[in-house]
Image: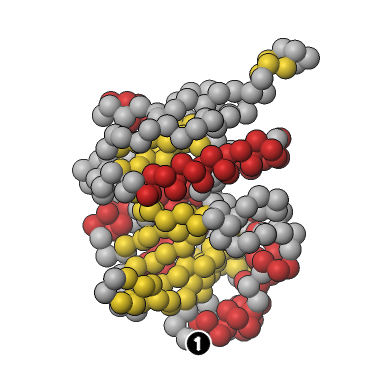
Amino acid sequence: MPSWTIHLLETPEEMLAVEELQRRVWPGSETEIVPAHLLITAIRNGGVVLGALANEEIVGFVFGFPGLEFTPDGPRPKHCSHMAGVRPDYRDSGIGFALKRAQWQMVRHQGLDHITWTYDPLLSRNAYFNIARLGAVCSTYHRSEYGSMRDELNAGLPSDRFQVDWWINTKRVERRLGKRARPTLSLNHLLRVGVHPLYTLQAGPFDAAQGKADNLPRPPEHVPPLEAQLIAAEIPSDFMALKSADFSLARDWRFFSREFFETAFAKGYIVTDFVFDKSEDLPRSFYILTDGESTLDASG
């Protein structure tokens, strides 16, 4: 049994604890914190705040609220999952997955079938979690979604975001959330079905003083032609480390990925999977885009 449990949070004291947890997860700017009074207002009006408790402390949470999306047939209700975070010392413990699974159950009980949220498409850990593990898909790219952000994780770069769609009543999502996890895809899986990386990342210039290149991956200069039914598009496996080492290179990646995904989505491609490959000395990360809604494995 895990050393933590998932609970529905409802009291002012619990909302204050969630407010404080946000400061530990996203340090550096009070302007990015959702205050307790707003959390309380949301849950009194259909919103959901779920927490992971360990030793009577809240160590993880997910927060969302009902909203509207506008379709050709008119507005329809959805759930907007605004924020999720886990205390640093409890990461990689399964809490994030358990919180999203509990959110899935709560929102289905409300009679809704669609959850959306945003994340930075260059963060490979988030991409793997959202797309590969949870079964969300994406065909929407927002430039500078939150304007200029001032917390330590986001400061200095345009706040471009994917908006993902989590269709919570589909077999795809139900299988991803089941007890028998889908096998992790690797680069070899891609190659076996004839999907080769769309482009090759180049290392930095040779450093004569150190006798080697800097090994920071460079994006292509231009978006290559997009023609195949399945496309594997590589991103840096550790964008935050790259940003810390070379901020101008991080900006290059932001603008290349913006052009790439906007071009792909305009041509009808959908992000349907993500591969985090550890078979080589350096991990590699690939988005899988499909011209349609097929996926690499028949089970979704």
Residue 175 is situated, as x and y percent measured from the top left of the image, at 28, 53
Location of the N terminus by quadrant is bottom left
Q: In the picture provided, is 251 more to the left or to the right than 169? A: right
Residue 147 is situated, as x and y percent measured from the top left of the image, at 63, 61
Camera sees residue 180:
yes
Rendered position, 123 above or below 96: above
Question: Tell me, what colour scheme is on the image?
Answer: secondary structure
Residue 261 in which image quadrant: top left
Q: In the picture provided, is 269 more to the left or to the right than 250? A: left
Q: Element under label 1?
A: loop
In the foreground, 170 or 6? 170
In the foreground, 253 or 238? 253
Q: Which residue is mark 1?
A: 44
**Which residue lies at the image location 44% right of the left edge and 83% below the top edge?**
46
- Farthest residue, direction left: 298
Amino acid type, residue under disc 1 in the picture: Arg
Residue 76 in which image quadrant: bottom left
